[in-house]
Image: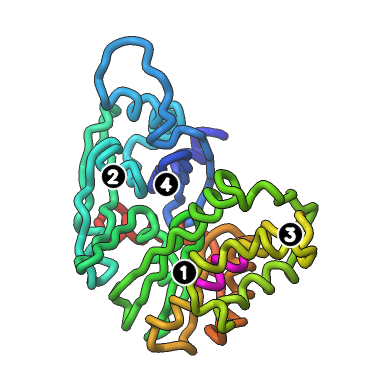
C-alpha cells in the first residue's frame, strides 16, 4: 500500500478482546480502508524479551499490529474498545452506569500513553447497578454501531455468544441489559460432562434437532427448568430418539430456547424490532428460536463494531 493511500487515514481503531486484536484503518468519511486481525488478545500478548514493564507487551502488540499505519498517518488518533480496558487490560476504563445516551460514552474515554508519540483512547464498559449487577465491555460499541442502522423508538439488541447480551434501547437511550451465559454453558456441558459422551460432531447443522430442543421450554416438562431438562440430551439418545450427531444441536436448541423463553418473560414488548449482532450461523439459530417464540421482527446488523468505533470517535471529538 502506497504512502498516498495511508495519508487518507483519519482514524486507527482497535477491537481488542480477550483472545484477539482486530484493527481498522478508517478514511475521512468513516469508510474502512483496511482490516487486520491478530491473535494478540489481552491474554495472549507477544512476549517481550527484555525487562518487566507490564505495559510493554501491549505496546509491542500495538506496534506489531499497526505500527506501519501509525508511521504513515502520524495525525490519526487511536481508539480501542473491549477487554483492553478491563482490570486485566492495558488500562482500566471505569464502567459507566446505565441508563445513558450513547454519546456520553464517547465523552468518557480513558487515555493511555502508547510510547508511540500519541495516546490511545479506551472506551469504557457499561454497568447496570441492581441487586444482581450486570456489566459489559466491548458490546456497547457494537450496540452503538447498530443504532446507526436502526432508529426505532424501541429496540432489543441481541449479541449471542459465549455470554449473550440483550440490550433494551428506548428513544435512543440504553436502558437495561441482561446476560445469559448460554454459549459458555453449552461448551462446558458438551465437553466436560457425561452429556458429551454420546455426542458426535454433525457434518452439517441439524435444524430439526435444534428446533426440537428449542421447543422444550414451551412444554409442561420445560417448566421444571433448564437444569432438569438438559439431561434429556442424553436420555433421548439412550432411548433411540436422537442419534449422537443430533444431540449437539438438540442441546444447543434447548439452551437457546430457555434463554429466549426467559427473555420473553421479562420483556414487556414482544413485538418490537430485534437486532442481532454476531456470527452469521449463530444469529441464524437465534432468529429461528425468536420466531418460534413469537418475538420480532428480527434483523441482523452488519459491521456494527466498525460503525460503533467511528461513532464513538466522533462523539469524543477525535474525528469530524
Q: Residue furthest front?
A: 239
Q: Which mark is residue 271?
A: none
Measure how far apart labels 3 and 4 are at the Cα level: 44 Å
Q: Earlier in the sequence, mark 3 or mark 4?
A: 4
Q: Residue at x 71, y 65 (%)?
A: 236
Q: Is residue 254 above or below residue 107?
A: below
Measure how far apart labels 1 and 4 are at the Cα level: 19 Å
SS label for mark 1? strand
- Residue 164 coordinates in the image, percent (x, y): 45, 62
Q: Is residue 240 above or below residue 76?
A: below
Q: Which residue is mark 2?
A: 85
Q: Report which quarter residue 1 is drawn in.
A: top right
Q: Report which quarter residue 9 is drawn in.
A: top left
Whether tag 1 and tag 4 are in contact, CB under 8 A, the answer is: no
SS label for mark 3? helix
Q: Report which quarter residue 213 is drawn in.
A: bottom right
Q: Of 34 and 132, which appears nearest the observer?
A: 132
Q: Which mark is residue 158?
A: 1
Residue 275, can we see it?
no
Q: Earlier in the sequence, mark 1 or mark 4?
A: 4
Measure how far apart labels 2 and 1 are at the Cα level: 22 Å
Magenta part of the chain? 252-259
SS label for mark 2? helix
Q: Which residue is mark 4?
A: 15
| Left or right: residue 208 compared with residue 295 | right
Whether tag 2 and tag 4 are in contact, CB under 8 A, the answer is: no
What secondary structure predominates along the stretch shown in magenta? helix
Q: Residue at x 46, y 88 (%)?
A: 270
Amino acid at each position: 500500500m502506497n504512502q498516498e493511500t495511508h495519508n487518507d487515514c483519519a482514524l486507527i481503531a482497535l477491537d481488542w478482546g480477550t483472545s484477539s486484536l482486530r484493527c481498522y484503518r478508517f478514511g475521512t468519511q468513516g469508510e474502512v480502508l483496511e482490516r487486520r486481525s491478530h491473535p494478540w488478545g489481552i491474554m495472549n500478548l507477544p512476549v517481550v524479551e527484555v525487562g518487566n514493564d507490564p505495559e510493554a507487551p501491549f505496546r509491542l502488540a500495538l506496534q506489531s499490529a499497526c505500527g506501519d499505519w501509525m508511521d504513515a498517518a502520524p495525525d490519526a488518533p487511536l481508539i480501542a474498545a473491549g477487554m483492553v480496558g478491563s482490570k486485566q487490560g492495558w488500562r482500566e476504563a471505569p464502567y459507566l452506569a446505565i441508563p445513558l445516551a450513547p454519546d456520553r460514552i464517547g465523552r468518557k474515554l480513558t487515555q493511555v500513553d502508547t510510547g508511540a508519540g500519541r495516546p490511545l483512547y479506551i472506551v469504557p464498559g457499561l454497568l447496570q447497578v441492581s441487586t444482581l449487577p450486570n456489566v459489559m465491555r466491548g458490546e456497547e460499541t457494537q450496540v452503538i454501531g447498530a443504532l446507526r442502522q436502526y432508529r426505532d423508538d424501541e429496540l432489543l439488541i441481541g449479541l449471542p455468544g459465549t455470554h449473550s447480551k440483550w440490550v433494551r434501547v428506548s428513544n435512543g437511550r440504553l436502558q437495561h441489559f441482561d446476560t445469559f451465559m448460554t454459549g459458555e454453558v453449552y461448551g462446558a456441558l458438551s465437553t466436560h460432562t457425561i452429556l458429551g459422551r454420546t455426542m458426535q460432531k454433525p457434518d452439517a447443522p441439524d435444524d430439526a434437532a435444534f428446533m426440537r430442543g428449542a421447543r422444550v421450554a414451551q412444554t409442561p416438562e420445560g417448566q421444571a427448568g433448564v437444569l432438569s431438562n438438559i439431561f434429556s440430551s442424553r436420555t433421548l439418545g439412550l432411548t433411540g430418539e436422537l442419534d449422537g450427531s443430533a444431540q449437539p444441536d438438540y442441546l444447543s436448541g434447548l439452551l437457546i430456547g430457555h434463554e429466549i423463553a426467559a427473555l420473553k418473560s421479562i420483556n414487556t414488548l414482544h413485538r418490537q424490532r430485534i437486532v442481532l449482532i454476531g456470527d452469521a450461523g449463530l444469529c441464524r439459530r437465534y432468529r429461528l428460536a425468536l420466531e418460534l417464540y413469537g418475538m420480532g421482527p428480527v434483523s441482523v446488523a452488519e459491521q456494527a463494531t466498525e460503525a460503533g468505533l467511528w461513532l464513538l470517535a466522533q462523539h469524543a471529538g477525535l474525528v469530524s
